[in-house]
Image (cartoon, rainbow, N blue to C red):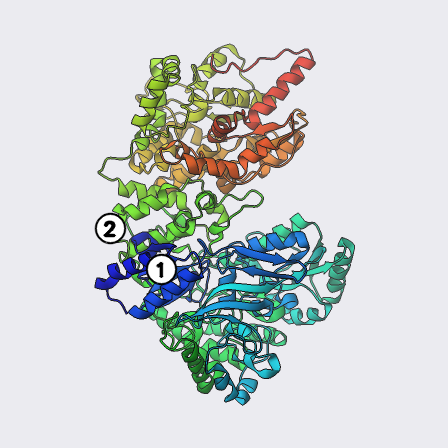
Amino acid sequence: MTDAGDLPALEAELSRVVRGDVGFDVTSRALVTMDASNYRRVPLGVVAPRDADDVSAVLEVCRGREVPVVARGGGTSIAGQATGTGVVLDFTRYMNRLVSLDPETRTAVVQPGLVLDRLQEAAAPHGLRFGPDPSTHSRCTLGGMIGNNSCGSHSVAWGTTADSVRELDVITARGRRVRLGQDWAGAPDRLRALVDGELARLRTGFPELPRRISGYALDALLPERGADVARSFCGSEGTLGVLTEAVVGLVEAPRARALAVLAYADESAAAQAAAGLLPFGPLTVEGMSADLVPSAAALPRGTAWLFVETGGESGAEARARAEAIVRAADVVDALVVTDPAGQRALWRIREDASGTATRMPDGSEAWPGWEDCAVPPARLGAYLRDFRGLLTEHGLRGTPYGHFGDGCIHVRIDFDLLTQAGVARFRRFSEELAELVVAHGGSLSGEHGDGQARAELLPRMYGEEMVGLFERAKGVWDPDDLLNPGMLVRPAPLDADLRFSVLPREPVEVAFGYPLDGGDFSAAVRRCVGVAKCRTTSVSGSSVMCPSFRATGEEEHSTRGRARLLHEMLAGEVVTDGWRSTEVRDALDLCLSCKGCRSDCPVGVDMATYKAEFLHHHYAGRRRPAAHYAMGRLPEWLRAVSRTRTARLVNALSAMRPFAWAAKRLGGIAPEREIPRVARRTFSRWWERRRSEATVGSGALVILWPDTFTEHLSPSVGQAAVRVLEAAGLRVGLPPTLRLVRPPVGDGRTVAMDPLSVLRGRGRVCCGLTYVSTGQLDRARAVMRRTLDLMEPVLEIDAPVVVLEPSCAAALRTDVPELLHDDPRAARLAAKVLTFAETLERHAPDWTPPRVDRPVAGQTHCHQHAVLGDAADRRLRQAALLSGELSGGCCGLAGNFGFEKGHHEVSTACAEEHLLPSVRDAPDGTVLLADGFSCRTQLEQLAGARGSHLAEVLAAALEEAGDEAGGGGTEPEGER
């Protein structure tokens, strides 16, 4: 093993012989210390090979220096087999192509780094698909699937990955290039002799069940099974050779599908019923219980469910098969869904279980380790009862789910992996559960492989003689033990190398409250378990996460990558300079703070908050980037312009190229950006003039929040909102601007002055968003406390606070109470915050909006998607006859992000993903909806199109209706 002093020489030699990327830097190493398991190993370096020649070169160099080599795909392995202490081969960067696809032979040639969904997309036009489909299908790679012999939900119909493998191109540890196939094709010397000498053991030593993944599949080498070396290689977890290309078989996809959701009284009833459904030929028989469902509203009545999919040549045939299964099943309730969108929504519930299961219902943590044991399907009910009993005996909790039709159960258990006593209990439970699985005729692994989590216990399943045979087979393939040592044979202990052991034992001092993590920043970072949903290369529906990863394709710009760097920052071994780390800073630099991960990540990682926290500490007592002063303190600059009445001058200067160039250079603003125009008259000034002339209504009072963007940059949005809210019969008020010693109970529109009261101060409310997004948290807290002081009269009355800017509403709902977690007023204010649509729905339920009757295009604001929800907006649009759906993703401007120097390329790439194409493809007459100022600005600057807030669209429709009725109407005054 190369010691630290030889690392520069190792790096230099690899760089000399490899055409791909060689990374021995802090970031490259930190990103691959973990996979999706409980384990952590620090590698020497990472190589992203461009081709098989690069792989050969790496193996030659590492063999000469006795440096282990670990092949890695998407890094979603649950058992620890994608981590290592030597050189990690990252196949996702370059060796990720679909080489060819032949519809006639129903085969495809793939490289190991190809993501499964890319293969499915290419096969779909031919009516074909790859059979196995793990829940991580949007980011797992074919190489990783072959290494683990992955299965997925359709294995009852199409088997495991090994069932779909035809031939494999492999480079052995000693550099031999072979093509593995049947009839001993590609077998290393001495392998056939080894098998011929152990025929009896191989014929009797393996349990017969559909999900037997543990150990080496040496029984595939039996003569009666075709001596299939390629099949035997599947599931070897990178310990026998390095895969460089694969020929895989495809299956015919059903023309139509139906999904029967069968409800049962409890989990055991569902488990017992699963095997009885197999004679009907279903495509899936998946099970889960209510513990894993955030809301069971979309599911039939029950506490456990089987998801049974059927196929057919037509929708009617698929439905008929599903209904036949419903009739045959003894269920509490059932639902048959044939609508593809409805099926996708239900399947997302099941697929997200891999992340949802990482938290118990009370919010406590749960971990893998015994993630996927499998037993014969007929014994599943009995096994689950015994499994539950063992959990109770050890004082543990877990929520099983998974592939009930194949007898394979996924579960995460609330192990205490932070203390010595908890780790000892983890070991005892593991040993006893292994015995239980074997007693039921099962396999320790039914899908995810043994890795470090289970390999130590393989003798309990196979016996010492069979495990000794595994070791001999490993010696034939890899006599130098170069490839992924410590996995499968001569394994590392299951309780060694736990990733939590390096984290600080005492809570780190932080600014945010982290209420869901007990105030512990380490616990917040631990939320990322590595399932890597953030690495999805395309979004569907309204999903957002993770736009910067999709723009760059780099792990460090994914939510998982950033969480890994924060983990290593806290550990202090690889990232050694804590909050001052430039590596963490650079990885977070391209985080748009879109908050998409807060809702789209199955475990609720909130990278926007973590980024703000990091920037707060990173720049404490130091000079900040110019953009933090220019845009982080935007409310201060805009108020100064308003007070001095210099908006006209500012706009004139910003339109002059030399002045604009100088301003952008000084302010750290991207030179490609135009500086937005400042309104010559603020919304509040328009409001004061209008209030003096208008008659106060008598309806229910609502407080309209004059956010910075509406106040200074888009006052027409506020004016339109007032028009619509009043048309709906509501009485509109603005927050107070005076703070009194004894705040009176007012209506929020005026402050009744008590002659004995003493003024404490004057100001404007502000959510603090721009300060938070740039990590100026001390300043943000001061702004927020001043806001709460001003809002005290409003907090004492029963009036909602209507916020038009989604990012400001999200900040008031989440950032303010989480940053001022010691001030009860913050939670009271957060509870009052409503969006424009929510206000109309809740406080003017009988009002009918004007008929717009036009299609819409645009994008749901990412903060609205992640924090606020858009159900009320959808209903309001429907009522106004605004047809069509808004796209998902992020506009890419994201407040200050897209304006900052160095971000323009990524900002534009994010906009090009969904927003700009939806605008280009929109037919004439389409309304471009963009409730966020950033979204409207991005549309204007990149597409030359004007987006409108929903309030503006409805106000214009009211004006049009008023004109048609001869009622005149008052046009919004804009910037006059």
> What amino acid does circle 2 point to?
Asp
Query: At 43% from the left edge and 17% from the top edge, which residue is drawn?
Result: 679
| Residue to which mark 2 is pinned | 577
Quadrant (top left/top right/bottom left/bottom right) for the N terminus: bottom left
42 left or right of 201? left
Place of residue 843 in the rendered image (x, y in percent of width and height, measured from the top left): 58, 30
Asked where in the image residue 407 lies, by quadrant, the reply is: bottom right
The answer to whether residue 836 is above or below residue 536 is above
355 left or right of 921? left
> What amino acid does circle 1 point to?
Thr
The answer to whether residue 278 is above or below residue 546 is below
How far apart marks 1 and 2 lie (CA) works out to: 18 Å
- Nearer-N-terminus badge (1/2): 1
Assign a secondary structure to mark 2.
loop
Place of residue 351 in the rendered image (x, y in percent of width and height, measured from the top left): 56, 57
The answer to whether residue 31 is above or below residue 538 is below
Place of residue 556 in the rendered image (x, y in percent of width and height, measured from the top left): 38, 49
The answer to whether residue 273 is above or below residue 951 is below
Residue 744 visible in the displayed image? yes
Place of residue 750 in the rendered image (x, y in percent of width and height, measured from the top left): 44, 19
Between 766 and 499, the residue placed more toward the observer is: 499
Query: At 51% from the left edge and 85% from the top edge, which residue is drawn?
Result: 195
Query: Which labelled disc corresponds to residue 437?
Result: none
Q: How dense is the environment of label 2, judged by Cα within 10 Å: few (below 14), some, or many (20 and up)?
A: some
Between 238 and 83, the residue placed more toward the observer is: 238
Residue 522 visible in the displayed image? no
| Residue to which mark 1 is pinned | 33
Assign a secondary structure to mark 1.
loop
